[in-house]
Image: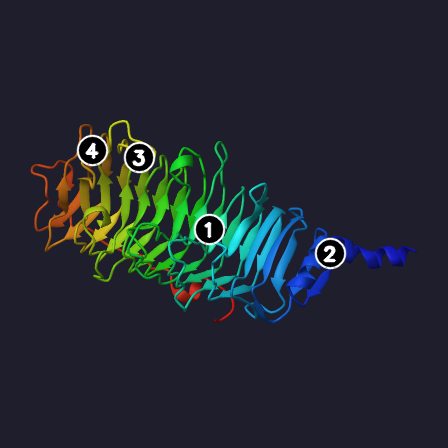
Amino acid sequence: MRSLVLALLPVLAFGKDIPVADAAAFKEAIKNAAPGDQLLLAEGEWKDSVLKFAAEGTQERPITIKASKPGKTIFTGESQISIGGRYIHIEGLYFRDPGQKSGEVIELRKDSKTLAFNCIVRDCAVISKAPVDLGKKTARFVSIYGTGHVIERCHFEGKTTAGTLMVVWFTPGGEGKHIIRGNYFGPRPELGKNGGETIRIGDSETHDTNAKCEVTGNLFHQCNGEGEIISVKSNENHFAGNTFLECEGALTLRHAHRCVVEDNVFIGNHKRRTGGVRIIGEDHVVRRNYFEALEGDGYRSALCFMKGIPNSPANGYYEVKNALVENNTAIDCKVTLAIGESDRKEATLPPVNCTVKDNIFISPKRPIIDTANPGPGWTWQNNVMIGRSIGINDLPGIISTKPEITKPKPLARDELGTSWSL
């Protein structure tokens, strides 16, 4: 009897490996999946396969849905995976040229009543190399609901349809606490209208959410869908250690307060409309970022402070207040600072009470500051500014010491994304 108990311990601790041949077999297998089980999806093409389910794992013993060999389980056509429940891991799946008529490819909810919590999507790819015509309909590669998810070491590329590539959705009063890290966001062509963001965190209706999401260590490469690479419509998010390479847009704090943007690298290589960080709202911190050879101006400037709208509606522009911009370096950008930028007549409130200190701004052939409309209460301290002109007469806080500049190493393509080759 003792030997039988010992033999069963590994099964009880780690669960079972369950081979799954196709979508029909998956539907049956998931019904009986227990914490610790791994459903191993067969190699080959899974055409028009919809995996829509709810399951309950635990933190110590998640339920894992994974390719039997990473990258070799290939979903095509109108395939989709929609997950409800807790502690579910999705690993190694490849969605190739998704049709997107359903609107979603990976959805972290089964339906509007069955959300997902504490799930991981890892080592997966969603790649479109064939243009898709959905008419006026919008679609997403990833929709994130619930709380506590991780999207890591994935590859997303080639979205041509209207709609944000990855959206974090909130319910009123909720919070996100999601982590998006180590992913490769590859080229996305210009959409030609609003809705071409790569990531959107929240929306105008739920922008007061204290989302507390982490976007760290990702590479955004030629993400040119629209002027907002990342659109932040929630509070208290953290963006750190990302690289933005030749992206025609900006990391945009659109309807947000109390966000931190730090240690990111923005490289434009003098490509048109490449931008940096756009600031809207209150109490943001932008520090230790590196901007080089960005050719954007206006709201695509390296650093842009927008004007606000009095009594702004949810979809308008809140006044910039109390922004801290420190220890950033900007080299050879078309417009280093744009202060009081606006694209709406009703936006009349200049940014106020902002602090700009300990930065290095060098652009020998161009003015450092283009649009110059700061409101009251600005503090300028210990900034190196070397340009054709400064852009504001008698600006205080400029030091003449020649700076030592250490260029940070941008993230490289082979450092992140999937473990398997496409």
Badge number at residue 15: 2
Q: Nearer the viewer, mark 1 or mark 4?
A: 4
Q: Are marks 3 and 1 in contact (CB under 8 Å)?
A: no
Instruction: Say which residue label 3 marks.
Output: 281
Q: Are marks 2 and 4 in contact (CB under 8 Å)?
A: no
| Residue shown at 39% from the left, 52% from the top | 163
Q: Quadrant of residue 9?
A: bottom right
Q: How crowded is the residue under tag 3: few (<14 C-alpha within 10 Å), some, or many (20+)? A: many
Q: How crowded is the residue under tag 2: few (<14 C-alpha within 10 Å), some, or many (20+)? A: some
* Amino acid type for the residue under numbered disc 2: Gly
Looking at the image, tell me whether mark 4 or mark 3 is earlier in sequence order: 3
Residue 143, position as x, y percentages in the image: 48, 50
* Amino acid type for the residue under numbered disc 1: Ile
Residue in front for this viewpoint, 395 or 370? 370
Instruction: Say which residue label 1 marks.
Output: 180
Instruction: Say which residue label 4 marks.
Output: 346
